[in-house]
Image (cartoon, coloured by chain):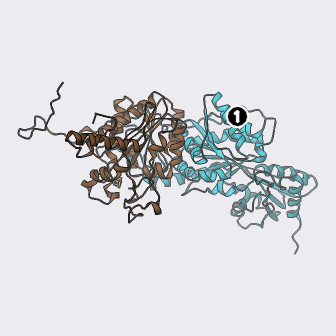
Chain colours: A brown, B cyan
Amino acid sequence: MTVTPVYLRTDVAPSEPSRRIVDDRPRLLLTDEHDMCPGCGEPLAVRCFCEAIEDLGQGNNVIVVAGIGCYTTFSMSLAIDTVQALHGRAPSLATGVKRMKPDTVVFTLQGDGDMVNEGLQEVIHTAARGEHITCILVNNGVFGETGGHMTATTVLGQRTKNSLEGRDPDYHGYPILIGDMLAPLQGTVYCARASVHNPAGVARAKRYLKKAFETQIARQGFSFVEILTMCPTGWFIPTNEGPAYMDEVMGEVHVTGELKVDGVLRTTEDLKAEWARKAAEAAARGGGPSFDVEHTPEGGEV
Amino acid sequence: MEGSEAIAEAAVVAGCRFFAGYPMTPFTEVLEHFAVKLPKVGGVCINAESELEAVGMAWGAVATGNRAATGSTGQGLSLMQESFSEITMAELPIVLFNIARGQYDYYQSTRGGGHGDYRQIVLAPMDVTEAVEHCQLAFWLAEKWRNPVLFMGDYLLTHTYEAVEVTEIDYGPVPDKPWAVDGSSSGTLDAKLVSSLGFDKVGRPHVGPQAHWLRLAEKWAVMREQEQRSETAFCDDAEVIVVAFGTLAKFVRYVVKELRAEGHRVGYVRPITLWPFPEPAVAAAASGSHVRTVAVLENNAGQMIDDVRLSVLGRCPVVAIGGISTDGSGFGMGALLDPAVVRERILSALEPVSA
Ligand code: SF4
């Protein structure tokens, strides 16, 4: 079967009025507006989980426990029952919620400062217990809310307000790849890392989130999805350079893909090798991937 | 029944369905009993990875409208203080157990180690019988006020066997819980937000921190008026008023009765709630011209004495007759928890002041 690509026609008038992105506001958002910076990736991540939950028919049966970060503003605008946690503490609260409401879908929304700095032991023990919740990490490698400071996931060389000359391993230590810590735990059933810096990444993030929620609904155990999100403000770059910076700087370290699915474990190093292999194959075919829309080691679908 | 078991049993009878804790002497046995009892009634007890997670889990459980509790010793509660502040600001009716090492946590329990303005009712039972009552009262008061209640026990309380029957006490109705999350209002304009900041979902009138915190301060002012509990005895003509709380107060009751029988003019006030502190009761006892001294007996270097001074307000001298008293391990009871020692201390306050 041949697939005919659909191109945007620019030679004729559109048959219907164009739609703005807010026209497709997910039902689980109470407003079209958010107060994030232009170019921020977090609203995209929010859209992904809202749509994933709706697609699974769980829109009236879901509770979120929100951490503290820029995304905390969504505590007020999500049409989802919300418990506001302290910085780092969302997984323990979500545990208490889920144990008392075992038939609901319960997830946490946390940033890298929240989950990987302050609350690291919470997410690890929650995974180890095989708690039937989903933890969502929106990872941008900085404390965006405080104005761009180093977190545990800041990549080497990255300049932040407290690593002005770039993160130096001798002085600041190395970044933590949290997915690689969670995936091997027996209680973890699904573990993946996605990115929202391009449409393919957004689609993948949503797909991973659906798989994670399905894991939870099937009472299989703990599920984790990390979503890399742009933070041009905290990265001190022009807004429109966010996606490229994500691809070339963060994405090189926090490589996207599934780290645990159906009992098969992969490390970030494995994902990196798969990407390299695919790039080499593509180059051999004569068409090298120009941007990481092909960053899909699990194959095909973008 | 041992005190620790009676406490867990009373909590279960009061409807507690979730407990999370981390073992620590002398609190450990309370956790052990919850671990046995809760699953039998369809509840959950989690051995948390630290006190930080224990309080977080109980916070989440209570946000669903279930009765939930956590606890530790004062040391463990030190770790939980950040959450105590936030849970209080979020108006969640959690119950907290401090099975303290001695009485060193008076400041912690009444002032709190957490941030900001916040208040919690603190109940300090003197024996296992009263603990069974207070345990149930704690859950009721917490829901009545949508405010955490702290139960203050110690080594002696949890490790003493008393013949008690744990039966349900009906303290009356509690308010509905329209704030509790269950996921069913998700996807609607009625989605809920349990937050300490006083904000609500978009589209509803936002209160905001200023108004929220003011309202809470007003609530605590009313609680302060309405929830003071204390026991006063033999104070009508007393020259010396002894003030003591918790298990130590049980010794004081016994010794004061004994001294009265011998003709000494001594009475006592036993604060049952440490917050709100029964200031009027202490002030009233200290008011007569017959009162020479108010003597504070506490098992620490002097903490409650501040509240006693604030109640007496210079009407008469306030002296400390207690002090630091612990065993070799630092967990248990020292020499002070002995009627003979308590008697000697009270007698020292009765001695006429030399001119
Ligand atoms: S600081 Fe960064 S994370 Fe925060 S809203 Fe701005 S772009 Fe987004």
> Ligand 1 near label 1 (Cβ, under 8 Å)?
no
Residue B153 is left or right of residue B224, and the answer is right
Which residue sits at x=39%, y=32%? A211
Vertically, is B258 above or below B42? below
Instruction: Kindly identify which chain the residue marked by label 1 belongs to.
Output: B
Q: Secondary structure at mark 1?
A: helix
| Quadrant of residue A51 within the rendered picture | top left
Residue at the far left: name it: A11
Which residue sits at x=54%, y=38%? A128
What is the number of callouts on the image?
A: 1
Observer-nearest of A301 and B45: A301
Q: Residues within 10 Å of mark 1 (few under 14, many from 20)?
A: many
* Quadrant of the frame with the N terminus of chain B: top right
Residue A38 percent across, percent down from the top left: 28, 53
Residue A229 percent across, percent down from the top left: 34, 48
Residue at the far front: name it: A284
Which residue sits at x=87%, y=52%? B339
Residue B48 percent across, percent down from the top left: 60, 42
* Quadrant of the frame with the C terminus of chain B: bottom right
Residue A295 is left or right of residue B178, and the answer is left
Vertically, is B165 above or below B240? above
For residue B188, say whether it is visible.
no
Q: Which residue is mark 1?
A: B9
Look at label 1 and name its amino acid: Glu
Residue B246 is left or right of residue B172, and the answer is right
For residue B353, say whether it is visible.
yes
Observer-nearest of B102 and B316: B102
Residue A169 percent across, percent down from the top left: 45, 60
Observer-nearest of A196 and A249: A249
Which residue sits at x=70%, y=36%? B33
